[in-house]
């Protein structure tokens, strides 16, 4: 995809950076890249989002008063930039997830399981098929649900912090998170990944 | 609000109990509260009710186990790291764009 900021500008004029920008970038670029990669699911889009985020932060740094933690401020900028970038790229309307669609209609659907018995999460994720299924399930989530899942379950933020970043109250965050988890569970279960035969090759019995 | 850490669901102790039908009543209520339950956000009396239901309903027990696994997998999903060259190149691109505006 096209980069959000020009990579062709030959020389930048010798200007002073806003106070603290280099430290801000150095201290938080890995955090924001991790978040961006989890949201976008692939490297180039994640880099675009990181650049857009820090460009906006550069321009807003002089107005940042420290009411929120720096990381919360950057997560907020990145989240808004992600929504803008996706809107430009796809223009697809978001669809809502309702709890009712996750109600199993047969005992078999209740019983579908994800193969983790006796394995640590790291060992389970050695299973290539499971890892790909997880990535695809998260990628399929409508973005407002994906954002809640990524911020809460992957970045480890509190529901209150996620609410600050997404502009929601805690109840709405928890509602979105719950639907996102149910969605991912259903996607993983529907893949019928049931048994590890060879974790490294992803050779599984379905 | 008193909170209590949810313990592992009890194993079904009476396999000959009447067959449980799903999709109604307690199972639907449980479905709505599962994330709050596994995040330890429910009051202890509700947690107790849920544990009691799980002890009697193996399908819900399996369902909640798979939801816990889903959350665990999300928490441990690996993500690639930036290289130092990536960091340097992106910084240059950001500053070039900022100064061009």
Image (cartoon, coloured by chain):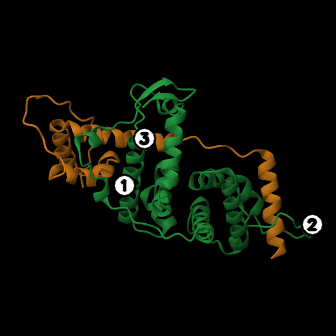
Chain colours: A green, B orange
- Residue closer to the observer: A128 or A54: A128
Mark 2 — residue? A11
Q: Nearer the viewer, mark 3 or mark 2?
A: 3
Give the vertical position of A71 relative to A83 (above or below).
above
Q: Quadrant of residue A14?
A: bottom right
Could you say where residue A105 lies in the image, as x and y percent from the top left?
24, 49
Q: According to the image, label 1 marks what residue? A: A178
Residue in view at x 48 percent, y 44 percent = B74
- In this image, A189 relative to B2: left or right? right
Please give the name of the residue rendered at 18% of the width and 44% of the height, measured from the top-left corner.
B48
Residue A6 visible somewhere in the drawing = yes
Up-down relation of residue A71 to residue B8 (above or below):
below
Residue at figure coordinates x 42%, y 32% from the top left: A206
- Seen from the viewer's position, the closer of residues A46 and A158 is A46
The mark nearer the N terminus, 1 or 3, is 1
Chain on which label 2 sits? A
Q: A61 or A191: which is nearer to us?
A: A191
Label drawn at residue A193: none
Report the residue marked by disc 3: A191
């Amino acid at each position: 995809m096209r980069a959000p900021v020009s990579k062709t500008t030959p020389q930048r004029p010798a200007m002073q950076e806003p106070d603290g920008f280099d430290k801000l970038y150095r201290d938080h670029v890995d955090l924001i890249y991790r978040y961006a990669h989890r949201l976008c699911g692939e490297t180039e889009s994640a880099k675009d989002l990181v650049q857009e985020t820090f460009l906006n932060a550069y321009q807003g740094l002089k107005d940042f008063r420290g009411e929120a933690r720096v990381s919360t401020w950057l997560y907020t900028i990145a989240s808004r930039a992600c929504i803008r970038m996706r809107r430009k790229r796809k223009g697809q309307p978001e669809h809502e997830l309702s709890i009712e669609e996750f109600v199993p209609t047969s005992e078999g659907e209740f019983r579908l399981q994800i193969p983790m018995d006796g394995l640590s999460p790291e060992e389970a994720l050695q299973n290539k098929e499971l890892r790909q299924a997880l990535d695809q399930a998260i990628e399929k989530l409508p973005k407002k649900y994906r954002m809640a899942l990524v911020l809460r379950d992957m970045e480890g933020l509190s529901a209150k912090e996620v609410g600050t970043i997404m502009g929601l109250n805690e109840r709405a965050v928890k509602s979105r998170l719950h639907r996102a988890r149910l969605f991912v569970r259903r996607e993983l279960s529907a893949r019928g990944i049931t048994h590890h035969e060879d974790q490294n090759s992803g050779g599984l019995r379905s | 609000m008193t909170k209590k850490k949810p313990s592992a669901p009890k194993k079904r102790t009476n396999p000959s109990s009447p067959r449980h039908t799903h999709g109604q009543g307690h199972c639907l209520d449980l479905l709505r509260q599962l994330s709050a339950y596994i995040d330890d956000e429910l009051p202890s009396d509700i947690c107790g009710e849920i544990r009691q239901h799980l002890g009697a309903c193996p399908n819900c027990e399996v369902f909640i186990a798979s939801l816990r696994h889903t959350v665990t997998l999300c928490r441990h999903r690996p993500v690639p790291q930036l290289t130092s060259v990536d960091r340097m190149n992106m910084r240059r691109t950001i500053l070039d764009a900022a100064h061009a505006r």
